[in-house]
Structures are given as structure tokens and as C-alpha cells.
Image (cartoon, helix red, strand yellow):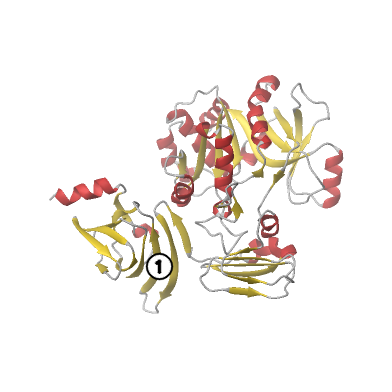
């Protein structure tokens, strides 16, 4: 059995800590068993390792999240990359093509799809594994996993079984689905043994390959990547699940929680105060999460969430925090903080002048032994001021060593890269007509390849 974790999200529901590059699953606001800060994706991957399932697991994600996954999980984690952000059906179709044509997975193999960020106990993954035997016993084309509801929630979708009569291993035949109901509808659904839809399902790989073939889509991963932009942006639920009649659901009665809003996330935090600042004892039920270098002081304020990052500052009553996605629906800005495979950066300042010239200032941290790729830019120049640590840089095939206090000028069109000999920081000032990621012309990623180029004429 193969497991695929879907990692996506636009980053609006947990703004300002999350953004288009750093979705909620990457926020290090939980605590590991060792007492270290831990993100949702790190927690889930640790649980998979503890249950022995990590070796048969993959992450499917867009290009913008690859480096953050590598930063948090390491460079060896297997990643299936979407060329652009689409909905869940294109992502799962591409995953199927990858498993078949690249990983060599048999069409008879069971594949389970699950979100990258469920907040669960280890028994959850035992039920995920059970989906394989459930499919064999039931003969179903799709096997879903449903959470036994604790209450009549209006926040989740529901899976409604045909009856309460269970199969040999406890599975139920599925009748239909209901999107987020109102309270009265939810109570009626629970009386019919309906289950919360937690977004976990399984199928034989060949089942999905057959669907791709019927749609005239290639089964080769690279070919499907080339045609990816032509695929309709539609969810797997609408494109496949709701059209399939032979579906069963495996109930799960253990702990499960969707940490999708500020009020649900803060319920699972071990401390009500993260980062620089003070929260007075009479600020009951208030949480402060501060990623800025300036202190925030909270006095006598009850049941608030105060979150601050380079992307902005949020002050909200806990009960009103789910409204943030609606409030920010028309708000767009470049991400002001990003984690990368080599470290992280914060945007200090960004200005676009009336004549069209742009200036962007970043504070960049690179971990010892890591490097930024060998690249060039056609539309901007850069100035690096080394703040701390030591590094080697390459400028147009020539190697130099730099240390704190040194200044490096990189004109437009200059090939350049940097390798941290120790943990190091520098201030980067970009100046140009268009400061966009598309102007990062990558030549090579590995430092060993970069160093060889100084010997090539």
C-alpha cells in the first residue's frame, strides 16, 4: 500500500503567519515529544515514521512548497511536484502517473490519499492501513475513511451510509454525501449514522489509470506534466467520488481534529505565548504568536488571538477568527517570509516608485553547509552586505570568500551563488524593473557542479 499526502493551501485562514508560500501545515506552533517547535507536516511525518509507514509514503505538492518541505523534512523525502497549482483531481491524476511510470508501482496496488495536516493519534494511521483490506473484502472501487462525530458540527462535510449494517471489518456502504450542513441538518445526519468526511480515501492504482485513459490523458508522468495546464481545475470529489456508485466507508472512532482556523489551532498549543512580548495573567484565553523582533504586550484582553509576522498583524476575537478568509479574499501581497531548503528570509522593505523602478530588501539566513543555487537575473541587480558568519561565493565562475562586513555587488546578468561555511546572514538589496521569481534563471543547484564551472572557459 502506498500513502500520498496532499500538501496545498493558499495560506489565508491562518494569516499572517501563513501565506501563499507558507501554508498552515508549515507553521511551527505545535510541540514535539522532545519539547521542540513542530509544524503539522513534521508531526504527521514523525507519526508515519513511528508507525513504519514513511518508507511507502509520498508528498504531492506545488513547486512553491517543495523547498519548505525539504527544509522541514529533509532532502530525501519523496515529492511529487505539480507544475502549477490546480485542484485535487489534477494533483491526484499526476500522482497516479508518477507512481505508475516513475516509481514502478503495480496497477493492482492500493493507494491511499490523505491531507498533509490531520491532527490525530497513531490509531488514525492504523485505520488508514485497514482501507486496503476493506477494499479487498468489499470489492469496492473506492474506500473512504469517516470520523465518528463527537457532536453535530457545521464545519465538516458528511458521509451518509446506506444503513447501519456493517461489513466484516466494520465498513459501511455509502449512500451519498452532504457538504457542510446547518445544525439541524447535522443532527439529522448523525441520527442516520453519518460520519465526518476527513478527506481520506483509497483506490487501486489501476482504477485511476483507467479513468485517465478514458479521458485521453497520458499515463506517463512527464507527459502529463506537459499537459497539466489543460486539465480542468476540479476537485477529486466532484470528478470521481460523486460519480462512483461502488463506495464504502471505514469508520474511525479515535481522536481527529482539523486545525484549520486560529481558534482550533490555539486549542492545541502548549503555550499561550510564542515569541517576543508579554501577556498578563488576567488576559484569560488570549494567545500571542509573535514572529517579529519587536515586543508585543497584551494587558487584560480576554479571548483574543494576536498574531504578528512580516506579512502583517492580526487581532481578532477567537470566535470571529474563521472570518479571516472572507475578510482577506481581495487582499494580495508578495510573501514577506519564506523557508527554503537552505534556510529562510524575511522581507524588510519593498518600494515601487512611480517611474517603475522597484527596490526590495531582504534579511537572508543560510544554514552551515547549505547553498543558494547558481543563478542570474536579467531585470535586477543585487547588493549583499554580510552581517554574520563566513561564506564562499561564485561570481561568473570566480570563487571568493566573504565574512561579516564585506559587501558584494552583483550587476544584472552576473552568474552568482553562495555557500555558507558557517551559519550566516546577509542583507540583500534588489533593484530593478521587475522583481519576480520568474527572473531567477537557475543554472545549477548543487554546489559541486557550481565549483566545477570555474574551470570551464
Q: Residue at x 28, y 62 (%)?
A: 378
Residue 416: % across, % down: 26, 58
428 to the left or right of 101: left
Residue 311 visible in the current orientation: yes
In this picture, is 324 found above or below 152?
Answer: below
SS label for mark 1 = strand
395 to the left or right of 139: left
Crowd band around label 1 with a 10 angstrom C-alpha radius: few (<14), some (14–19), many (20+):
some
In this picture, is 248 found above or below 68?
Answer: above
In this orientation, which residue lies closer to the viewer: 370 or 136? 370
In this orientation, which residue lies closer to the viewer: 382 or 279? 279
Residue under numbered circle 1: 362
Which residue sits furthest left?
457
In this picture, is 240 found above or below 387?
Answer: above
Residue 271: % across, % down: 65, 59
In this picture, is 108 found above or below 276?
Answer: above
Residue 136: % across, % down: 65, 20
Residue 441: % across, % down: 31, 55
Amino acid at each position: 500500500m502506498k500513502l500520498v499526502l496532499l500538501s496545498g493551501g493558499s495560506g489565508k485562514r491562518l494569516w499572517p503567519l501563513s501565506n501563499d508560500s507558507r501554508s498552515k501545515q508549515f507553521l511551527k506552533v505545535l510541540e514535539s515529544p522532545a519539547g521542540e517547535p513542530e509544524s503539522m507536516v513534521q508531526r504527521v511525518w514523525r507519526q508515519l515514521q513511528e508507525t513504519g509507514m514513511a518508507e511507502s509514503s509520498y508528498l504531492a505538492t506545488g513547486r512553491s512548497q517543495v523547498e519548505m518541505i525539504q527544509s522541514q523534512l529533509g532532502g530525501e523525502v519523496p515529492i511529487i511536484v505539480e507544475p502549477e497549482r490546480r485542484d485535487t483531481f489534477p494533483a491526484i491524476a499526476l500522482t497516479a502517473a508518477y507512481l505508475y511510470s516513475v516509481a514502478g508501482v503495480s496497477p493492482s496496488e492500493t493507494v491511499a490519499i490523505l491531507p498533509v495536516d490531520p491532527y490525530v493519534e497513531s490509531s488514525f494511521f492504523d485505520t488508514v492501513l485497514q482501507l486496503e483490506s476493506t477494499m479487498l473484502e468489499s470489492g469496492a472501487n473506492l474506500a473512504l475513511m469517516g470520523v465518528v462525530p463527537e457532536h453535530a458540527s457545521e464545519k465538516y462535510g458528511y458521509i451518509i451510509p446506506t444503513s447501519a449494517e456493517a461489513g466484516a471489518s466494520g465498513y459501511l456502504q455509502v449512500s451519498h454525501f452532504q457538504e457542510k450542513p446547518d445544525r439541524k441538518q447535522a443532527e439529522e445526519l448523525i441520527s442516520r449514522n453519518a460520519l465526518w468526511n476527513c478527506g481520506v480515501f483509497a483506490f487501486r492504482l489501476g482504477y485511476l489509470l483507467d479513468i485517465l485513459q478514458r479521458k485521453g490523458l497520458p499515463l506517463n508522468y512527464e507527459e502529463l506534466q506537459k499537459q497539466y495546464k489543460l486539465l480542468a481545475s476540479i476537485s477529486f470529489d466532484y470528478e470521481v467520488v460523486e460519480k462512483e456508485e461502488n463506495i464504502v466507508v471505514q469508520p474511525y472512532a479515535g481522536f481527529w481534529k482539523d486545525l484549520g482556523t486560529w481558534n482550533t489551532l490555539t486549542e492545541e498549543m502548549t503555550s499561550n505565548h510564542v515569541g517576543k512580548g508579554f501577556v498578563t495573567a488576567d488576559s484569560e484565553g488570549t494567545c500571542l504568536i509573535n514572529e517579529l523582533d519587536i515586543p508585543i504586550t497584551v494587558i487584560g484582553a480576554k479571548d483574543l488571538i494576536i498574531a504578528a509576522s512580516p506579512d502583517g498583524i492580526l487581532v481578532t476575537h477567537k470566535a470571529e477568527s474563521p472570518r479571516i478568509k472572507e475578510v482577506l479574499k481581495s487582499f494580495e501581497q508578495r510573501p514577506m517570509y519564506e523557508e527554503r531548503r537552505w534556510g529562510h528570509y524575511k522581507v524588510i522593505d519593498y518600494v515601487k516608485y512611480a517611474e517603475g523602478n522597484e527596490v526590495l530588501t531582504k534579511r537572508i539566513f543560510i544554514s552551515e553547509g547549505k547553498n543558494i543555487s547558481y543563478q542570474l537575473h536579467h531585470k535586477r541587480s543585487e547588493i549583499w552586505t554580510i552581517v554574520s558568519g563566513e561564506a564562499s561565493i561564485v561570481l561568473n565562475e570566480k570563487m571568493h570568500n566573504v565574512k561579516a562586513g564585506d559587501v558584494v555587488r552583483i550587476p544584472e546578468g552576473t552568474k552568482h551563488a553562495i555557500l555558507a561555511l558557517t551559519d550566516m546572514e546577509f542583507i540583500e538589496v534588489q533593484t530593478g524593473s521587475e522583481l519576480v521569481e520568474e527572473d531567477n534563471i537557475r543554472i545549477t543547484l548543487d554546489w559541486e557542479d557550481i565549483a566545477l564551472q570555474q574551470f570551464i572557459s
